Amino acid sequence: MLQSSPIPGPRRKIVIASPRTFRCLNCNEMINDSMTQCRYCSATIDPVAAQLVAERQEKAKQAYSDASYLRTAVIAMFVFLGISFIPFVKVLGWGFVITFFVVLVLLVRWMMKCGRLVTNDADYLRARRSWRLSLVLWIVAIPIGFIIRPLVYLAFELATR
Ligand SMILES: [Zn+2]
């Protein structure tokens, strides 16, 4: 990605395969690391620092989109859980069980991939909050889905016998 000539210093040549966009540390506008100066505030961009910042922001963005998939899976899980309480559509309970495990996998994957990222990026902080909320909701789903729901089925069967 980034190659510099052996001569260090401000005039070294930088070859960048594809410029990455990132937010200027000075003015927060979107710029890319092929620039030597911010287009908006004229702050000088250190190419190496820019590369690091761009990489970190890219990871934060990834963490954010992964967390929103997780949130979607949590919503789907609760929709299935809610519907499966209606005894006549018991079969949809499988939708709950499947999404329950999908959420578990996504929770673990996010933690392994993005959990240790050290950044104050707003997207990342939002992603982490969303991850924690998903974890809480997943835990809440355990007693509802695996204890209360079977009891409701049992009660229904006894009542309609
Ligand atoms: Zn700037």
Image: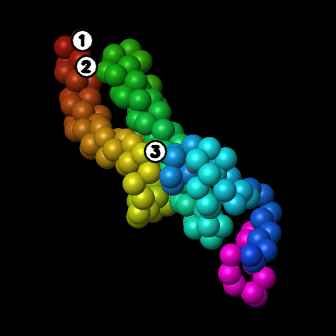
Q: Which residue is mark 3?
A: 123
Q: Amino acid at mark 3?
A: Asp
- Is the C-beta of the residue carrying label 3 under 8 Å from the nearest atom of ligand 1? no
> Residue 59 versus residue 85: which sits nearer the camera?
59
Q: Which residue is mark 1?
A: 160
Q: Which residue is mark 2?
A: 157
In screen coordinates, is 129 left or right of 25? Answer: left
Q: How many marks?
A: 3
Residue range highlighted in magenta: 1-10
16 shown above or below 63: below
Q: Amino acid at mark 2?
A: Glu
| Residue drawn at point x = 65 percent, y = 67 percent | 47
The residue carrying pointer 3 sits among few (fewer than 14), some (14 to 19) or many (20 or more) residues within 10 Å by Cα, namely some
Task: Report the quarter where the N terminus lies.
Answer: bottom right
| Residue drawn at point x = 68 percent, y = 52 percent | 32
Q: Amino acid at mark 1?
A: Thr
Magenta stretch: includes residue 109: no
